[in-house]
Image (cartoon, helix red, strand yellow):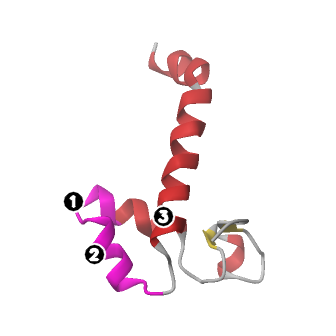
Amino acid sequence: MEGRVINVDPDILGGTPVFFGTRVPIKNLFDYLETGDTIEIFLEDFEGVSKNQVVRVLEMSQKLIETSTNILHENIA
């Protein structure tokens, strides 16, 4: 799926960022990963989300972290 991956709409879960085309909050993915679950388990539990969407969200998160290095360094000190 090309195009939008994340949707923020005040009419969907009060504007919580969700996977586009679903009502699945992006935060759910990170909650699963934080507890040690795999992407495959997440995808089994949220069938409306595609693996491509998960990969793209993770790539976007990586880019955000990489481009925020100065901010991160300021907060570590």
Q: How crowded is mark 2: few (under 14 residues within 10 Å), some or many (20 or more)?
A: few
Compared across the picture, whether 70 is left or right of 33 comes to right
- Residue at 55% in and 57% down: 56
Compared across the picture, whether 67 is left or right of 34 comes to right
Q: Is residue 47 above or below residue 20?
A: below
Range drawn in magenta? 32-47
Q: Name the residue under label 2.
A: 41
Q: Name the residue under label 1.
A: 36
- Residue at 58% in and 38% down: 63
Q: In this view, does 76 lie above or below 1?
A: above
Question: In the picture, residue 10 is in which quadrant?
Answer: bottom right
Q: Position of residue 26 (x, y in %)?
A: 53, 66
Q: Distance from label 3 to label 1 (Cα)?
A: 16 Å
In the current view of this chain or complex, which residue is farthest to the front? Answer: 2
Q: Where is residue 72 in the image (x, y as percent from the top left)?
A: 53, 24
Give the amino acid at mark 3: Val
